[in-house]
Image (spheres, helix red, strand yellow):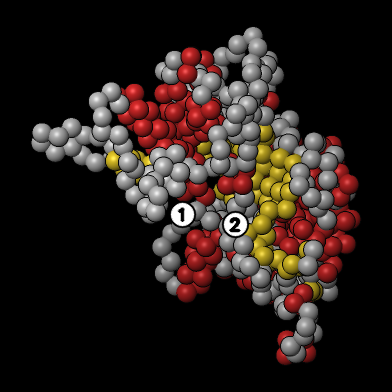
């Protein structure tokens, strides 16, 4: 095997590659990488052609990356016909990186996608917005076959995946009403609040929400978390699972009450992925029902935001809230292999865009927005660019003669040329004027119902544009839509 380093020609001397030897062709005793001993007699043209061919193959290998030996049995092809999504009567085996195209059908547009994913960001009490979005999807007959969540998004994922389609909305509603009830003293009747709150002046609403946030800090939330005894803060215990202001032990029973974990662990019905960070290593981890059996602890770990909530032990390791590293699981869905056509409903609770703050309270709120929005726009921009490159490679490979397509390096390139289509529908919660930095732990019943209603309204408005659900065309294999951004198309 030889490596080549290109060298520009000089006047009077033609360009030629410098062939560097490997251990197999260097002179005895010469260091690795020393110039190989090439024959200088006449009649060596054939051997030089072989050297140039070998150099070219090495260059292709560097472009594709060091990914092991080329596959010898792959039958992937990248042709112009595939780029246009037409089908031959019989198709060869598909590579490990690219799944077969979904067969065209006469049903709703969303059913043409092999993946229909619901991606749920973390955001505490704001998570009721995601429940409203799911209700609208269910009303529209759209049922995800993959749900991925972080923090409160993971808890919503557990309730959705842990119930049959016909009872998911009911169970979501029951779950949120249960955890938003105050454990010590009952709040005002919800009917009274919903009728009178729209007439309140904004200072009164700010005061009311602040009171509910303060009660959450002092009392905790029913079936979710309870404050620890003051003595626990001063002692240095040996259990990392107690190093927090609140105890989340009640959450385990709540999740098992509202979600069937046997159903959650049926990946053929719905794939479930939740993200957390390993406290010891700092590495991000996804718990996925296609790789392991999920328990309530996996979802609790995804929402264990320190120092408020304790780390959760899973198989000898302790995990914190995945939002510490990345608060949205979008990239996990976009980079999954084999690549498939995907319709992704990305439901975010923090907006990267906002007003310039003019006081310290606004600064605290804006800081949270930026920190936990997790640059989702940047992720979609990068993924769109990658998908466009894959399409260009696919078009370029269509120019390769058929006689050369059995070459293993052509088939390796075909893996990278997979032109799966991606359609990301973005739904981002929009703050209300009276909300502040406590909005993520303000679990009052009134606020919960308002968040739910906002999510339901946004998804209903989105589904009024059925063309947004259509499969992207070959010229734009990656598209995004957002009802809050004018025409909804980036």
**Residue 307 figure quarter:** bottom right
Q: Percent x, y for residue 15?
A: 21, 34
Q: Is residue 60 left or right of residue 426?
A: left
State the CA–CA distance, disc 1 to disc 2. Answer: 16 Å
- Up the image or down, 175 lies above or below 462; here it is below
Can residue 27 be seen here? The reply is yes
Q: Which residue is drawn at 86% across and 44% down?
A: 263
Q: Percent x, y for residue 48?
A: 32, 29
**Which quadrant does the N terminus fall into?**
top left
Depth check, mark 1 against mark 2: the one in front is: 2
Are discs 1 and 2 less than 8 Å apart at CB? no
Can residue 446 be seen here? The reply is no
Q: Name the residue under label 1.
A: 353
Q: Residue furthest left?
A: 11
Label 1 residue SS: loop
Q: Which residue is drawn at 10% across and 36% down?
A: 11
**Which quadrant does the C terminus fall into?**
top left
Q: Is residue 129 left or right of residue 471?
A: right
- Up the image or down, 67 lies above or below 399; here it is below
Q: Percent x, y for residue 250?
A: 84, 67
Say whether disc 1 or disc 2 marks the residue closer to the N-terminus.
Answer: 2
Q: Which of 161 and 59 is in front in this view?
A: 59
Q: Is residue 177 left or right of residue 8?
A: right
- Up the image or down, 279 lies above or below 477; here it is below
Q: Which residue is drawn at 69% across and 74% down?
A: 308
Q: Which residue is drawn at 63% across and 67% down?
A: 281
Label 2 residue SS: loop
Q: Nearer the viewer, residue 354 or 303?
A: 303
**Residue 443 figure quarter:** bottom right
Kindly identify which numbered label has been placed on residue 327: 2
């Amino acid at each position: 095997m030889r490596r080549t380093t290109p060298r520009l020609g000089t006047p009077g001397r033609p360009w030629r590659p410098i062939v560097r030897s490997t251990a197999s062709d260097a002179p005895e005793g010469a260091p690795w990488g020393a110039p190989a001993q090439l024959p200088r007699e006449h009649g060596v043209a054939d051997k030089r052609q072989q050297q140039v061919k070998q150099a070219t193959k090495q260059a292709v290998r560097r472009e594709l990356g060091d990914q092991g030996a080329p596959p010898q049995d792959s039958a992937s092809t990248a042709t112009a016909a595939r780029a246009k999504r037409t089908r031959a009567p019989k198709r060869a085996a598909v590579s490990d990186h690219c799944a077969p195209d979904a067969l065209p059908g006469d049903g709703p547009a969303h059913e043409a996608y092999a993946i229909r994913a619901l991606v749920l960001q973390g955001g505490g009490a704001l998570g009721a917005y995601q429940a409203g979005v799911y209700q609208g999807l269910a009303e529209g007959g759209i049922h995800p076959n993959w749900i991925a969540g972080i923090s409160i998004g993971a808890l919503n994922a557990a309730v959705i995946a842990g119930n049959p389609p016909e009872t998911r909305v009911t169970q979501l509603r029951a779950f949120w009403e249960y955890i938003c009830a105050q454990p010590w003293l009952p709040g005002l009747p919800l009917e009274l609040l919903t009728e009178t709150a729209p007439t309140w002046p904004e200072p009164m609403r700010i005061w009311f929400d602040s009171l509910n946030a303060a009660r959450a800090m002092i009392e905790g939330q029913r079936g979710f978390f309870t404050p620890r005894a003051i003595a626990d803060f001063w002692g240095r215990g040996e259990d990392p699972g107690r190093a927090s202001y609140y105890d989340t032990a009640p959450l385990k029973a709540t999740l098992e009450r509202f979600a069937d974990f046997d159903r959650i662990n049926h990946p053929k019905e719905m794939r479930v992925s939740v993200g957390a960070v390993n406290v010891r290593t700092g590495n991000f981890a996804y718990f996925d029902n296609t790789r392991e059996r999920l328990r309530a602890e996996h979802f609790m770990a995804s929402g264990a935001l320190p120092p408020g909530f304790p780390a959760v032990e899973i198989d000898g390791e302790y995990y914190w809230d995945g939002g510490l590293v990345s608060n949205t699981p979008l990239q996990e869905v976009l980079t999954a292999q084999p690549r498939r056509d995907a319709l992704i409903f990305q439901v975010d609770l923090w907006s990267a865009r906002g007003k310039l703050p003019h006081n310290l309270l606004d600064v605290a709120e804006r800081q949270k927005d930026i920190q936990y929005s997790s640059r989702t726009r940047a992720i979609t921009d990068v993924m769109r660019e990658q998908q466009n490159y894959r399409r260009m490679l696919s078009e370029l490979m269509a120019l390769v003669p058929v006689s050369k397509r059995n070459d293993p390096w052509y088939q390796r390139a075909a893996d990278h040329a997979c032109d799966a289509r991606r359609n990301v529908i973005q739904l981002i919660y929009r703050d209300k004027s009276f909300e502040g930095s406590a909005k993520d732990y303000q679990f009052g019943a009134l606020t919960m119902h308002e968040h739910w209603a906002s999510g339901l309204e946004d998804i209903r408005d989105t589904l009024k544009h059925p063309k947004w659900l259509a499969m992207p065309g070959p010229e734009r294999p990656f598209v995004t839509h957002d009802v809050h951004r004018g025409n909804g198309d980036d």
